Amino acid sequence: MKITKLTTYRVPPRWMLLKIETDEGIVGWGEPVIEGRARTVETAVQEFAPYLIGQDPARINDLWQVMYRGGFYRGGAILMSAMAGIDQALWDIKGKALGVPVYQLLGGLVRDRMKTYSWVGGDRPADVIADIRRLREAGFDTFKMNGTEEFGIIDSAAAVDAAVGRIAEIREAFGSQIEFGIDFHGRVAAPMAKVLLRALEPYRPLFVEEPVLAEQAEYYPRLAESTSIPLAAGERMYSRFEFKRVFQEGGIAIVQPDLSHAGGISECHKIAAMAEAYDIALAPHCPLGPIALAACLQLDFVAHNAVLQEQSMGIHYNKDAELLDYVINREDLRITDGYIAALPKPGLGVEIDEERVKEASLRAPDWRNPLWRHADGSVAEW
């Protein structure tokens, strides 16, 4: 079998899908994208195409190394995201060619269903209690929300009280009937992270995500020593070589690689195994589309340390399209009591409605995240 063509489709709300064709008619789908940089990743995918056209798609390991090492400069958000989508599509082809789900090729199931959680509250956390009540009716009992709005390097007691008060209201409304993670989203700098973590401790969040930005990872062990709240990070780290240093230094309880950003299934399978060796839980980052979610699930079903799976059904970013709008076999991705069962179909387990993808790609927006500023006019972390 030989690879014959790579085609990208940018589609609403902010996703990009990749179709890899072969001379035997087997097609694989991937999801290479950086939110807000879809066109840049699209170019990177096409720059990788000459390395792939005419090659055997079954040689996933070799093709991954060719893409990673063959161009001298390597790593980073754009290149690793392009590689991630290509890698997903190659695994999809391999599974379809052999007639089995990808998780069978990775050694088989370690669980029968995967626990998921749902976003609530939006970019600026609001109406969180109403969102939780609505989603509880759909069977969810685990949630994640942004912890703050703009937050200064040094900020006021009022800003801390507002963030903590919101969490206190959730515990008061639901007690221990639900669990929730709090995403600092890189908005909180190191001087205030310890303050917020200490103030949040009585409300026992499931985790705090990105307590500081990944480029400040040296603070993870220091913050972990000062709090009993499990710390999570990893969505803005792109290879096992970055994760290696974080694991060695300690501090992270839950690692969150994104299978559309961190080199795909091949790389994240290795990252998950490294994390297990350090007794770190796995909760793949996935606020993206159906192929990204399917790729995450293939890993979740073989990684013993996988504990939670993010998914984007109803997430505040989804404008003009929802998670399953481009999927034919929607029933396979049905969430029951907060869980998704092992996907039964071969490859990634998702059948893509190609005609709908093509039609939607004609009106794809160039999504950008908001640009926030502090009261003094300086740029704030979004």
Image: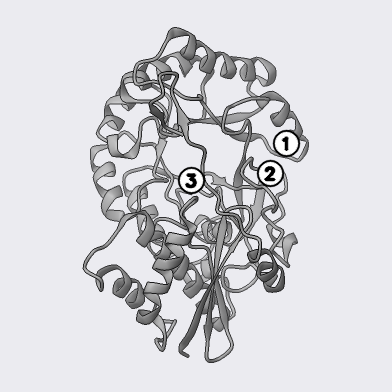
Q: Position of residue 101 (x, y in %)?
A: 57, 71
Q: Residues within 10 Å of mark 3 (few under 14, many from 20)?
A: many
Q: Which residue is mark 1?
A: 135
Q: What amino acid is labelled 1 in the image?
A: Leu
What is the tally of numbered marks visible in this picture? Answer: 3
Q: Residue furthest right?
A: 137
Element assignment for label 2:
loop
Query: Disc 3 marks which amino acid?
Result: Ala
- Estimate the x, y position of residue 272 in percent, counting from the top left: 39, 53
Q: Which residue is mark 2?
A: 314
Among numbered discs 3 and 2, the one appearing first in the sequence: 3
The numbered mark at residue 283 is 3
Q: Residue at x 64, y 42 (%)?
A: 315
374 lies left or right of 129: left
Residue 350, compared with residue 142, is above or below; it is below
Residue 348, quarter of picture: bottom right
Whether residue 351 is visible to the viewer of this picture, yes or no, is no
Q: Residue furthest front?
A: 377
For the residues labelled 3 and 2, the Cα–Cα distance comes to: 19 Å
Residue 342: % across, % down: 62, 60
Q: Give the crowd class for mark 1: few <14, some 14-19, many >=20 residues within 10 Å.
A: many
Mark 1 or 3: in front is 1
Viewer-nearest of labels 2 and 1?
2
The answer to whether mark 1 and mark 3 are in CB contact below 8 A is no
> For this rendering, which residue is in front, 30 or 343?
30
Q: Amino acid at mark 2?
A: Gly
